[in-house]
Image (cartoon, helix red, strand yellow):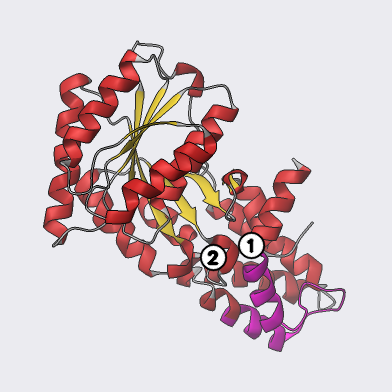
Amino acid sequence: MFGLFKKFKDGLAKTVSAIAAKTRGIFGGRTIDAASLDELEEALYTADFGVETTSEILAEIKQAYRKDQALQGRQAAEIGAAVLQRVLAGAEGTLDAKAAGAGGNPVVIAMIGVNGSGKTTTSAKLAWKFKQEGLTVTLAACDTFRAAAVEQLKSWATRLELDVVASHTGADAAAVAFDGWQAAKARGKDFLIVDTAGRLHTKGNLMEELAKIRRVLQKHDAAAPQHRWLVVDGSLGSNSIEQARVFHKSFGLTGLIVTKLDGTSRGGALVGIYRELKIPIYFLGLGEQPEDLQPFSAANYAKAVFGLE
């Protein structure tokens, strides 16, 4: 658990340092004051925690400050982390991996998101993570619209020794999904992870392609895809909330993965997504390596954001 928290802390270092810099050491050993509370408010807004969450955090710290004018920065940080953890209660996605493949069919996870979100890389990392846990996985390279995506996924599959089904650039994505499901079924795999396209000529075209993949998969298994996870770039801040709204309306999202949190000072948007849509968060991308895809922990996230050990 300590190693996992260190990964969160290291991965969210820019978010932590951004808040700490703006609060002039509010998380240090000195007492806080009205000026430092103003700085904290600015830092939380800058990090895209949103009006509701920022207001709740500030309200509880100010209430504690009114009761104790000698309130220490660390105490304020602990209050902030507790509020953040409370806001994220129920946000941790849990996957019953033991049930995967129990009915004879692979469990399908459709990975959804716009280009640049890290969706293809995350698909490979997720497959590797399952493999490390003793599960069997097939990847389906269904982002056939983007020239580099198929080769990118095949390269990751070779590097990590993963099973992949792919075709050529421009191939029918639904046909690749169909072939992927058949291969996963024939090979007795627990999971099929489908890497979908992130951009077509219009948003309508993209949504129709996702719907077509879903229809084709349901010819094999009426429940597929059992999981529809949105991959969002954490550095986009509040823009990622709008992405989640659009995909959720069209495709009925069941989970969220937030990537690139190791390189941004805007790591608060996932809170806004959860508050509004109540989509569980399964993983955070905290670095370039396969092991940097970490299960989401509300407690670890809250502590890391506020610089607590």
Label 1 sits on what residue type?
Answer: Leu
Label 2 sits on what residue type?
Answer: Gly
Rendering coords of residue 86 (x, y %): 58, 52
- The tag earlier along the polypeptide, 1 or 2, is 1
The secondary structure type at the circle numbered 1 is loop
The secondary structure type at the circle numbered 2 is loop
Instruction: Name the residue: 26% across, 55% down.
Output: 146
The quarter holding residue 41 reads: bottom right
Name the residue nearer the viewer: 229 or 152.
152
Instruction: Name the residue: 85% across, 77% down.
Output: 70
Residue at the outermost bottom position: 35
Rendering coords of residue 264 (x, y %): 55, 70
The residue singled out by tag 1 in the image is 12
Q: Which residues are magenta?
A: 13-42
- The answer to whether the residue labelled 1 contacts the one labelled 2, judged by CB atoms less than 8 Å apart, is yes
Task: Report the side of 134 relative to 201 (left or right).
Answer: right
Residue 157 lies, with reference to residue 301, above or below; the image says: above
Query: Can residue 85 be seen?
Result: yes
The quarter holding residue 205 reads: bottom left
Instruction: Name the residue: 15% across, 41% down.
Output: 172
Q: Gap in Å between the C-alphas at discs 1 and 2? A: 7 Å
Task: Report the side of 35 relative to 219 (left or right).
Answer: right
Numbered marks: total = 2
The residue singled out by tag 2 in the image is 267
